[in-house]
Structure formats: C-alpha cells, structure tokens
Image (cartoon, rainbow, N blue to C red):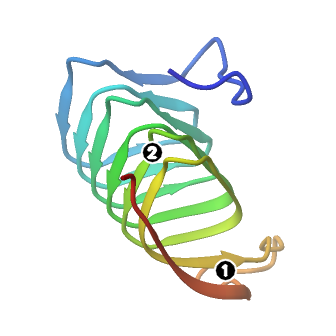
Amino acid sequence: MFKKDVKVPDKFDTLIGKNTTFQGNIETVGTIRIDGKVNGEIKVEGDIYIGKDSEIIGNVYTKNIFLSGKVQGNIEAQGLLNATSTAEIYGDIFVQNLITSEGSIFEGKCKMVEKQNNQSSGKNPRKKSDSSASSNKN
C-alpha cells in the first residue's frame, strides 16, 4: 500500500478500516491511519497515513501526512506532505516540505511555509514561496 521509502509505524492510535465510511469531524493528538472513507474535517496533532483506496472529503490539518489515496479539500501540514504515485489532491496545500511521486495528481495552489516558532499563534505563518500546480495522469 505504501512504498518502501515511506516508513509506516506498526501501531496507530486510531484506525479507520477499508470498509468503513465515517461522517463527521475527527480530532486526535495521536497518529491515525485511514483506509476507508471520511466525509468531514480531520485535525491530527500527530501524523496521518491515508491508504491508496481511501477517500477524504474535507480539510485536513496535521503535523505530517503520508498520502496514497484521494483528498478533496485543503491540506495544512506543519511538516511534510508525502504524496505517493497513487495520491490525488483536489484542493490547496499549505506545507513546510513537499514530496510527490510521479503519477500523483494535484489540482490546486501550493504555499510553502516556514516552520513556525513556539511564539507564533499559527494563524499567519511566514511564506517561503507561492506557486500553483496542476498535473494529471494520462
């Protein structure tokens, strides 16, 4: 499901299984793995792993995101967004670091932001660069 270069932990605090559809918002401080479908906002203080057959409809806020599935909404990651070759993103992303594999789809705007210091409120991170990107599988 994830390439060998993405280290997946053995244990997750929250797991949404392949045959599960979740309606509503999710908030957690731990690590979460989603292999099913979520319709709602997701706020994770830890890392989030989204499997290749999963679908998220809503905004995602997290520390790091490892994406192999589909997100229809904005993504804000304080650290890394790693989009594998099966990832699909339809929305804007705000990240500190971005890795995309060949074959991934991204339709939206990308804002690279600097790491926030502890005194920052987190509402207006300083901007490194602003770019628009769009790629499609053919």
Image: 91 above or below 88: below
Which mark, by number, is residue 46?
A: none
Left or right side of 133 for 82: right
Left or right side of 21 for 35: right
Residue drawn 61% across the image and 40% down it = 47
Image: 48 above or below 124: above
Which mark, by number, is residue 87?
A: 2
Q: Amino acid at mark 1?
A: Ser
Q: Position of residue 43 (x, y in %)?
A: 45, 52
Q: Residues within 10 Å of mark 2 (few under 14, many from 20)?
A: many
Label 2 residue SS:
loop
Q: Position of residue 83 (x, y in %)?
A: 56, 47
Q: How many marks?
A: 2
Q: Is tag 2's residue or tag 1's residue first in the polypeptide sequence?
A: 2
Residue sitting at the far front: 138
Residue drawn 78% across the image and 76% down it = 114
* Discs 2/1, front: 2
Residue bearing the label numbered 1:
121
Q: Position of residue 57 (x, y in %)?
A: 24, 53
Q: Nearer the viewer, residue 112 or 120?
A: 112
Residue drawn 45% across the image and 45% down it = 87
Q: Amino acid at mark 2?
A: Ala
Q: Position of residue 132 (x, y in %)?
A: 52, 83
Residue sitting at the far top: 10
Q: Residues within 10 Å of mark 1 (few under 14, many from 20)?
A: few
Image: 118 above or below 123: above
Q: Measure the C-alpha gap from mark 2 to mark 1.
A: 31 Å
